[in-house]
Image (cartoon, rainbow, N blue to C red):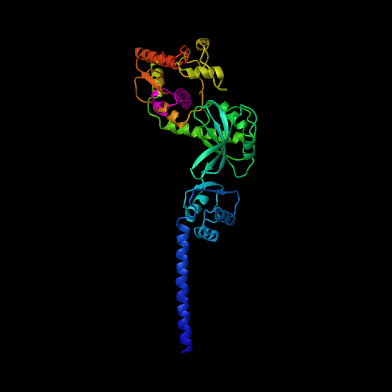
Amino acid sequence: MIWRNIASNFLTLAIVLLIAAAAAVAWAKREFSGPGPSAVAQCVQIAPGASLNAVSNQLAAQGAISNAYLFRAGADALGKSRELKFGSFLMPPGASMEEIVGAVTSGGASTCGTEVLIRVGVRENSVILRDMNPETGAYEDMARWNPAEGARPEPIAAAEELADVRLSLVMAEGVTSWQVVEALNAASFLTGEVAETPAEGSLAPDTYLLERGGDRNALLARMAERQAAILAEEWEARPFGMPYETPEEALIMASIVEKETGVAAERPQVASVFVNRLRQGMRLQTDPTVIYGVTGGQGILDRGLRRSELDTTTPYNTYRIDGLPPTPIANPGRAAINAALNPDETDYLFFVADGTGGHAFSRTLDEHNAAVARWREIEAQQGLPTDSPVQTDG
């Protein structure tokens, strides 16, 4: 009888323990997968080489998770305890531990935290120190520096030395290779001397993540590989009958299209004008090529072209030479390359600025002259000089 009571009590205890264990497991799953404790967005930063234990304690301390042990146990149960990725990741309010584990183990581009951004622009290069405001999800500039204007500001210099600061470069469409090299030379955290400026047009405009101590030449090689791949893909998919004998000729045209318009939707129309002119044996007559012949791609021309410059025959003066110039005049993006190889089907032979930031396109010289007259009126109303040459004016 005694043994029967002991067995009965043991069985009852076992059942109670099983129920308690099941309840604990259910609670743990709810805690791990349910909404987290943070009422605001959190920037979760993972340092290089950080352990899961250190990360879980950090997250608990900043209020992103409710239980460091449960976070580690859940990551281990998912088989991701050894898959932490370096970076900074923005987590929305109420992010669950499961969501945070997924973010910090899948990697990818950082989405928050402090960043030193090198921006290679058409008019100037700049270095920007900025930080993500977790509450708004927007980056806010903390310091900005133009390398052409004096010494590097102390906040930027200090940030470049911090291990947890993200470093990146944004190369705009239409910048020259010389401008890219100038920007890389201004990045004190990079290494390696660039002995020769890469061929014009050979670098792909894009965003590039950088590493402290990274080699400038290796980065330029990465940019060139990307551009070569883009050009090969677009050339392979080109339609029949385009007036280019080589991919390089298409790249030259793409660079002209890139420099002629800042309106993305206009690229195929602008390309159609130049393709129509090539097919009809007309000169391209485009100012950006002449400007490149004057500057060599080293900086911008902060004035209008002079009549003497338009009248001088150079390899880039498309008012004086037939066909394309010998090289690209900038580094075009994929959209411009695509437009050069897939222009709109139009009868346009001319275009001129229309005062809205875009252009007025014309089929005949009479239509074009009328559009030019309207543009001259706009120039006069805006107090702009009206004696500058007009693009593709026949």
As drawn, 183 above or below 371: below
Q: Which residues are magenta?
A: 243-269
Quarter assignment of residue 182: top right
Does residue 49 appear anywhere in the picture?
Answer: yes
311 or 44, nearer to the observer: 44
Q: Residue at x 46, y 75 (%)?
A: 16
Q: Where, quadrant-wise, is the C terminus in this rendering?
A: top left
Q: Residue at x 47, y 60 (%)?
A: 31
As drawn, 340 above or below 380: below
User: Residue 225 location in percent, x, y?
Assistant: 53, 34
149 or 367, nearer to the observer: 149
306 or 137, nearer to the observer: 137
Quarter assignment of residue 147: top right
User: Residue 42 location in percent, x, y?
Assistant: 51, 49
Does residue 283 appear anywhere in the picture?
Answer: no
333 or 13, nearer to the observer: 13
